[in-house]
Structure formats: C-alpha cells, structure tokens
Amino acid sequence: MGALVLLLGENSTIGTGTSLKDGVTVKQSSMIGMSSLISSSDLVSMFLSIELQSFAVYILATIYRDSESATAAGLKYFLLGSLSSALILLGSSLIYGFTGLTSFEGLYMLCSTTTSNHAIEISVLLIVVGLLFKVSAAPFHNWAPDVYDGVPTMNSKDLLNYQIGLHGHIYY
C-alpha cells in the first residue's frame, strides 16, 4: 500500500515547490514508528519507535519552508517534543538504574512480586508524564493549539491523525 501511495504521488507538488513525495516518505516513516511501537517489548524499543514517529511529524509540521508560521509551529513542536522525550528518557534511565531491567515483562514480574518501591513509582510517573505531554493529553495539552494553528490545514489534519494513532497505541 505504501509503495502505491509513493507511485501515485511521484510527480505531484504541494504548496510552493515542495514535493509531495517528500511528505509521503515522511508519513511512511511515521507509520513505521507507530507500527514498531506495537511490537516493542522493552523501554528502549518503545522510546526509539516513539521518536521515529515524532521526528517524522516534526518534519511534516515544517514542510512548508516559506511559511513563517509553519516554521515557528514546527520549532515549538520540536522543542516541546524534546522536553517530553527527556522526561521519558529520565524515567527509563531511573528504572534501569534501580532495577537493572528494561523489558516490560521483567518489570511487571518485579513489580508484582515485591513491595512498593517509591523510586520505581516516581520513574513510572516521569514516563507517563512524558507520554501524556507527547500526545498532548490533558493537563499537558496547552501547547497543541499553537502548533496546530501555525501548521497548514492539510498537515494539521495529518498531525492530528498521528496524535490519535499514538493515543491508541499508548492506551491500548
């Protein structure tokens, strides 16, 4: 299906000379990130797949290089996405530091057999806050209207679809 989309958009352009093929390639990269998120089994693969999806969306937000508002929205999206990535990495590194485990199955077995550990709870809280910030869920959603307002309508629709897709992967 992805190859068919690439072939259909080969000679098309969007905006002022930006090739549609660039946008399709970026969208496919984001889809690969979301697909690999489904099959992730540890903290490292989860983080890398979320970041693969996020980098593609950052590029998609700034694909109209001539638009000042799109460039500002993309920069804001990148900086706030970096903050959420830092929170996810901090929580993951704290979990690894306290337990020596990164696999979800090992962490589940450790947490189900031991008493509550406040350090692990704080680490999980940091990861959850980072994920909620990345998908712009309440109460961490105040930045999203600024970004979606600055991005052109076609890309705003795609950004929203990717956010909803990432919501489904995280909450599933």
Image (cartoon, helix red, strand yellow):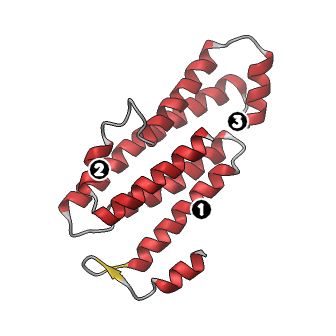
Marked residue nearer the N-terminal end (3 or 1): 1
Marked residue nearer the N-terminal end (3 or 2): 3
Q: Which mark is residue 147?
A: 2
Q: Amino acid at mark 1?
A: Ile
Q: Amino acid at mark 2?
A: Val
- Tag 3: Cα neighbours inside 10 Å, few (<14), some, or many (≥20)? some
Q: Amino acid at mark 3?
A: Thr
- Report whether 63 appears left or right of 16: right
What whole-number distance in Å separates the C-alpha atoms at marks 3 and 1? Answer: 22 Å
Marked residue nearer the N-terminal end (1 or 2): 1
In the foreground, 57 or 89: 57
Q: Circle 2 sits in a helix, a strand or a loop, which is it?
A: helix
- Report whether 83 appears left or right of 6: left
Q: Which mark is residue 32?
A: 1
What whole-number distance in Å separates the C-alpha atoms at marks 1 and 2? Answer: 23 Å
In the foreground, 129 or 101: 129
Q: Which mark is residue 102?
A: 3
Q: Picture coordinates of residue 108 (x, y %)?
A: 75, 28
Q: Picture coordinates of residue 159 (x, y %)?
A: 40, 56
